[in-house]
Image: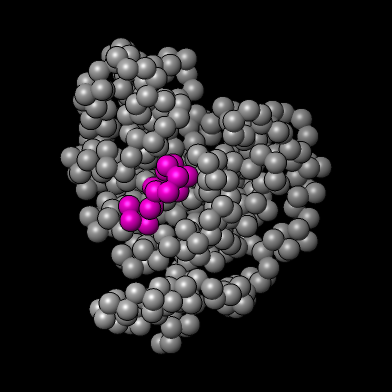
């Protein structure tokens, strides 16, 4: 099989999970701008997600956020997803919005608050059982703002204790995905601030615990691809949350700020054997000023383009240049792949899958955007905290 044919075969197997909350009203720092036609409930979120999959062919699952996507009958929600041609994906917990969590959740100094947080995480595992989801995704806003506010080491002990209880509740084929974030909302210490802390807890917990790399949750200049390579080498990379940052956790469309970085990350994924279902490719973005569904389609396409370029790196030529110490040639091999226009290749892939070669244009011609604006009148729009 030629290099190009192998790349096409791999691209046809790619899957990118979209987040339910990205279809609702969401914002970043100061304001959420509502848009007409936004879903009013989890069922309508799935309807929109199904359109992304319909036009890209590689977005078959949708992540839920609890309690934002809470329903009375999760089996019915899963059936609705199946009827629309998608499936329910990771269950994301929420331990950052309640007033009780002002000083933390799973790391809070008050045992009653910690109990509340852990009970919520256990509820999320119950929802996994009901939906068939295999992934519990955890992000904690826990931390402190001032020196002396709380005992740093004790907070790590509380974190370990809570995680261990939830870990023991996981069923066969289920796993825990632990995300890290180096700051915000806590500014002095964050309880899971980096990949090393997340890795250390996951290592102690066992094989069902793995690390999530959110591409926006790093300090400027961080070599994210090194983190990816290391976690893959250790068998502890469970998932990505893809987005872009210019300054901090900006939650912009993946590939928008630094497409070269996304390419470098995807090369390490492929080089390290991470281009498998065991490493989940998820989007975690907010679309505040741009139209939501087209932005998500574009994000999926950006991941596809970075992946296609990474697949075209000439591994034999690169290995030879590296072995001989030819620095310039090694870099040239990588840059040749990055500078390749892969859009014609991806158009061919989509056509061979029976899709329109131009997903965004196809979506716009479908009339779905106008349909939801006309029909979704009344009720309360879904958004952060809803």
Q: Residue at x 50, y 29 (%)?
A: 67
Vertical comparison of 292 with 362: above or below: above
x, y (%) of residue 125? Answer: 35, 36
Vertical comparison of 339 with 207: above or below: below
Q: Residue at x 32, y 78 (%)?
A: 326
Residue 221 can be seen in this image? yes
Quadrant placement of the C terminus: top right
x, y (%) of residue 196? Answer: 27, 42
Q: Residue at x 72, y 64 (%)?
A: 362
Toward the bottom, the furthest residue is 1
**What range is drawn magenta here?**
213-227
Rendered image quadrant of residue 331 = bottom left
Vertical comparison of 371 with 386: above or below: below
* Residue placed most toward the observer, 265 or 335: 335
Prevailing secondary structure of the magenta residues: loop
Task: Judge whether residue 306 is colored magenta.
Answer: no
Total numbered labels placed on residues in the image? 0
Residue 82 can be seen in this image? no
* Residue placed most toward the observer, 2 or 329: 329
x, y (%) of residue 262? Answer: 48, 59
x, y (%) of residue 299? Answer: 58, 55
Quadrant placement of the N terminus: bottom left
Task: Judge whether residue 220 is colored magenta.
Answer: yes
* Residue placed most toward the observer, 259 or 96: 259
Residue 163 placement, left or right of 214:
left
Q: Residue at x 68, y 53 (%)?
A: 294
Vertical comparison of 150 with 7: above or below: above
Residue 374 placement, left or right of 277:
right
């Amino acid at each position: 099989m030629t290099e190009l044919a192998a790349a096409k075969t791999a691209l046809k197997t790619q899957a990118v999970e979209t987040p339910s909350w990205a279809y609702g009203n969401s914002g970043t720092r100061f304001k959420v701008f509502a848009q007409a036609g936004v879903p009013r409930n989890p069922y309508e979120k799935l309807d929109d997600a199904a359109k992304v999959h319909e036009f890209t062919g590689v977005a078959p699952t949708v992540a839920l956020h609890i309690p934002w996507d809470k329903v009375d009958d999760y089996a019915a929600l899963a059936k609705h997803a199946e009827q629309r041609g998608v499936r329910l994906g990771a269950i994301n917990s929420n331990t950052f919005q309640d007033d009780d969590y002002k000083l933390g959740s799973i790391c809070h100094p008050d045992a009653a608050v910690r109990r509340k947080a852990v009970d919520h995480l256990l509820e999320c595992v119950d929802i996994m059982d009901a939906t068939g989801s295999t992934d519990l995704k955890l992000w904690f806003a826990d931390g402190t703002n001032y020196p002396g506010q709380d005992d740093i080491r004790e907070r790590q002990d509380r974190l370990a204790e809570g995680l261990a209880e939830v870990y023991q509740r996981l069923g066969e084929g289920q796993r825990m995905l632990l995300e890290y974030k180096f700051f915000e909302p806590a500014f002095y210490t964050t309880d899971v601030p980096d990949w090393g802390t997340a890795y250390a807890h996951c290592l102690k917990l066992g094989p069902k615990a793995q690390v999530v790399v959110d591409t926006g949750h790093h300090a400027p200049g961080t070599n994210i691809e090194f983190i990816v390579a290391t976690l893959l080498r250790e068998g502890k990379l469970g998932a990505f949350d893809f987005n872009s940052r210019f300054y901090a956790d900006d939650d912009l469309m993946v590939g928008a700020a630094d497409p070269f970085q996304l390419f470098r990350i995807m090369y390490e994924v492929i080089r390290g054997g991470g281009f498998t279902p065991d490493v989940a490719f998820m989007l975690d973005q907010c679309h505040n000023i741009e139209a939501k569904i087209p932005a998500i389609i574009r994000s999926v396409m950006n991941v596809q383009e970075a992946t296609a370029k990474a697949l075209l790196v000439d591994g034999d030529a690169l290995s030879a240049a590296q072995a001989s110490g030819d620095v310039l040639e090694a870099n040239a091999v990588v840059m040749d792949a990055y500078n390749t226009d892969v859009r014609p290749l991806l158009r061919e892939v989509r056509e061979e899958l029976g899709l329109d070669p131009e997903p965004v244009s196809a979506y716009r011609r479908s009339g779905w955007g106008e349909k939801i604006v006309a029909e979704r009148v009344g009720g309360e729009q879904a958004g952060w905290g809803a």
